[in-house]
Amino acid sequence: MATVEMVLPAMGESIMEATVLQWLKKEGDTIEEDESILEVATDKVDTEVPAAHGGVLQKILIQEGDVAQVGKPIAVIEQENGAAKEESTLVAAVVEEEERVAVQEPSQPAAKSSPPTPKTETTRFYSPLVKNIAREEGISVAELEQVEGSGKEGRVTKKDILNYIKHKQSGNGHSSPTSASQPTQASLVPVTAQAGDEVIAMDRMRKMIAGRMLDSQRISAHVTSFVEADVTNIVLWRSKNKQDFEQREGEKLTFTPIFVEAVAKALKDYPMINISVDGDKIIKRKNINVGMAVALPSGNLIVPVIKNADQLSLLGLTKQVNSLAEKARNNQLSADDLSNGTYTLSNIGSFGNTLGTPIIMQPQVAILAVGAIVKKPSVIETPSGDAIAIRHKMYLSHSYDHRVVDGALGGLFVRKVADYLEQFDLNRMT
C-alpha cells in the first residue's frame, strides 16, 4: 500500500486559499476518485472538492474552519497505486507555478484615496475566513490594516484577528484614527427587536453580498441613465421561433442571450465602458466577459460570467446562459464561472420590475438592468403618417462610475444597446 498527499486544487484565477467548511468524509472512509470529499469557501464561491485519487482517507490535514493553501496538502490518501505519489507531486508543482504567476499579476483595482474619504480597499491579502470574522465584528478595512499578522509575509491569521477582537473588547485594541467614522456592515443605529419580531441571522453569502454592496457604493460615484426601448421585433421573433429552436437545439430560447448579445456589441462600440480603475490608472479590458445576475433558491444573487461574449453566436450565448443558470440553481458553479467579469447585466424584469438603479460589481465600472417587457400604446411612423399602435416596451437602467465614465459616454452606451434591440431583424435565422 502507498500513500499520496491530496493537494487543494486551483480554484480559479487569483484565488490562493480557501476555508474548509465541511469534510464530507471522515478518516478511515473509502473514497472513489472524483468523489466529493469536502466543501470549501473562497471569497467568490462555495464549492465541493473532489478526491484526486481513490483509496482510503487516512488523515485529514486541514480541519473545518481552517484555511488551506492552493497547491498544499489537505489530506493523505492510502492507495495501492504507488505511482500516484509522483502524480501528486507534479500537480503540486503545476499549482505552485500558477500561484506564483497569480502573485505577480496587478492587484485588484482600488479607489483613489483622498482625505477625508475613509480607506475601503487594500492591497494587503486577507483570507475569506478573516474577512468574514471582520465583517461579523464590524471591523472596517482601515481598522483591519492595523492588525499585526503572524502568518506568511505578515498575513493576518484567524488567531490574529480573534486575539485583536479579544484585546479590543477589553479596551486594549488599537484602531485606525478613521475607524470610528468608517461605515461598516454593522448597523449604525441601535436596533431592538419588538415583541413578536422574528430575528433571522444572515447566512455567509448574504453577509458577503452586504459587504460588497457597501464597498461598491463607497468606491464608485454612482450615476444612472435610463432609456426606453421598443423590443416588439424581439418579442415577435422569439414567439415565432422558440418552439422550433428548442426542438432542434434542445435549449430554451429566453430573452437574456439576446440582451447579452446587444450589450457585447455595444461594448465593442464603446470600449471605455469595458474598463476597471486601479488607483489613478485605467485598465482597458481586451476581453468582453459579461456577467449575468442569477437568483439562487435561497433568494441570494450570484453573478456567473459569459467569457468572450462578443465571439459567441446567439446559439452559443443561449447555451452559456442556460448552462450557467442551471449550475447556479444546483449550487454547482465553480470559482472560474464567477471570475473575470468586465460588465454585468441584471434582468430585473424577471421579477416584474420595470425600473431599477443597480449597484456596480467591483472592479467593473458599469452595470445594466433590463426591466419587464410591457405592452404600451405608442406613436409610430407609417408610410401613411403617424399612428397609435400597441408596442412591447422595456426600460434599460445603466449605472456607471462617474469617476471615469461621463454622462455623455454612459448615456450613449445605453442608447446604443437600445438601438441594437430595436433594430433586431425579424427575419433572422435561428
Image (cartoon, helix red, strand yellow):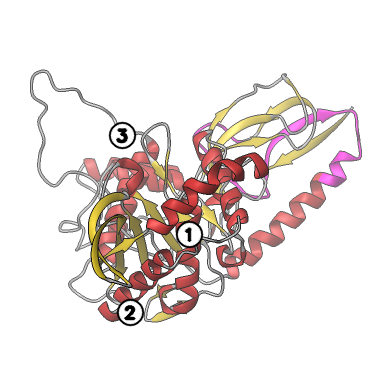
User: The magenta stretch spans which residues?
Assistant: 62-87
Residue at x-position 60% and y-position 45%: 245
First in sequence, mark 2 or 1: give its number: 1
Against 415, residue 236 (above or below) is above
Q: Secondary structure at mark 3?
A: loop
The residue where tag 2 is placed is 409
Against 79, residue 288 (above or below) is below
Examine the rendering and report whether any part of residue 310 can be seen.
yes
Label 2 is placed on what type of residue?
Answer: Leu
Residue 62 placement (x, y as % from top left): 60, 36
Q: Secondary structure at mark 1?
A: helix
281 within the magenta span:
no
| Dot in front, 3 or 2 | 2
Against 339, residue 199 (above or below) is above
Label 3 is placed on what type of residue?
Answer: Met
The residue where tag 1 is placed is 260
Q: Quadrant of the C terminus?
A: bottom right
| Dot in front, 1 or 3 | 1
How far is mark 2 from mark 1, CA to CA? 19 Å
Label 1 is placed on what type of residue?
Answer: Val
Examine the rendering and report whether any part of residue 126 can be seen.
no
For residue 164, which numbered disc appears in the image? none
Residue at x-position 57% and y-position 38%: 332
The residue where tag 3 is placed is 202
Foreground pick, 49 / 126: 49
How far is mark 3 from mark 2, CA to CA? 38 Å
Label 3, residues with CA under 10 Å away: few <14, some 14-19, many ≥20: few
Label 1, residues with CA under 10 Å away: few <14, some 14-19, many ≥20: many
Residue 42 placement (x, y as % from top left): 51, 46
Residue at x-position 26% and y-position 60%: 217
Residue 420 placement (x, y as % from top left): 43, 68
First in sequence, mark 1 or 3: give its number: 3
